[in-house]
Image (tube, helix red, strand yellow):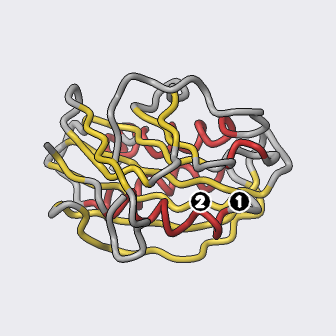
Amino acid sequence: MRGRTSAIGALALALALVACGGGAETPPTATGATGGGGSPSAPATAERYENAEHRFAFDRPDGWELADPPAGAVVALYPPGGALDAFAENVNVVIEQLPMDLTATEYMDLAWAQLEPQLRDVEPIARDELTVGGMPAASIEYRARFPETETEMHLLQVAVLDGRTAFVITYTGTDEFERYRPDAEAIIASFART
């Protein structure tokens, strides 16, 4: 078990990236990637984002900005006007290569066991096993305060496993979490390997 816990870092990294969204006047500079939403709650207009280097794609709802990701993330998106409040709601993707076979639930359990003690005022909301893009996935939704800030964050994290590659998709928000949730869920639901 010790080898397993030391191997799980993406969810911890994804949590560390949460603080990077706060307080921005505008989202970071857009990258040259092409982007795209798609689930039952997806907006009518969406554009497909494809990441050739890491071989994944998802739909980007209309108005969501692709931005230079924080260190450790592969891509970050911000909703229209989302960067104008005290915290910039965002969706980001972190990738981790695993040294062993794990189920999505095992991955999430191990990562959560490392992360939860680092958080304050943790309020678990839901956990689920699901399939995203035909791949096994596990999700966790919770509220927590991070040591770096007094702001309560609301997070929805989904770990999608493709063999020994873990894609951790994190939607983070504060007061505007529910406002952008349908778009964030559409991004997650449309995630696929290319």
Locate the C terminus and report the quarter of the image it occupies: top left
Task: Name the residue beneath numbered marker 1.
Answer: 144
Q: Amino acid at mark 1?
A: Ala
Residue shown at 42% from the left, 34% from the top: 75
Tell me the crowding category of disc 1: few under 14, some 14 to 19, or many 20 or more residues within 10 angstroms, Cα based. some
Check disc 2 and give the amino acid type: Leu
Q: Position of residue 32 (x, y in %)?
A: 38, 22
Q: Which type of secondary structure does the marked residue at label 1 adopt?
A: strand
Tell me which residue sits at (71%, 62%) in the image: 176
Q: Which residue is mark 2?
A: 155
Disc 2 and disc 1 in contact, CB within 8 angstroms: yes
Q: Position of residue 55 (x, y in %)?
A: 18, 36
Camera-side residue: 111 or 46?
46
Tell me the element at label 2: strand
> Callout 2 environment at 10 Å: few (<14), some (14 to 19), or many (20+)?
many
Q: Position of residue 78 (x, y in %)?
A: 57, 44
Task: Estimate the x, y position of residue 74 in percent, counting from the top left.
Answer: 39, 31
Q: Earlier in the sequence, mark 2 or mark 1?
A: 1
Determine whether, in the image, residue 35 is placed left or right of residue 82. left
Residue 176 to residue 93: above or below: below
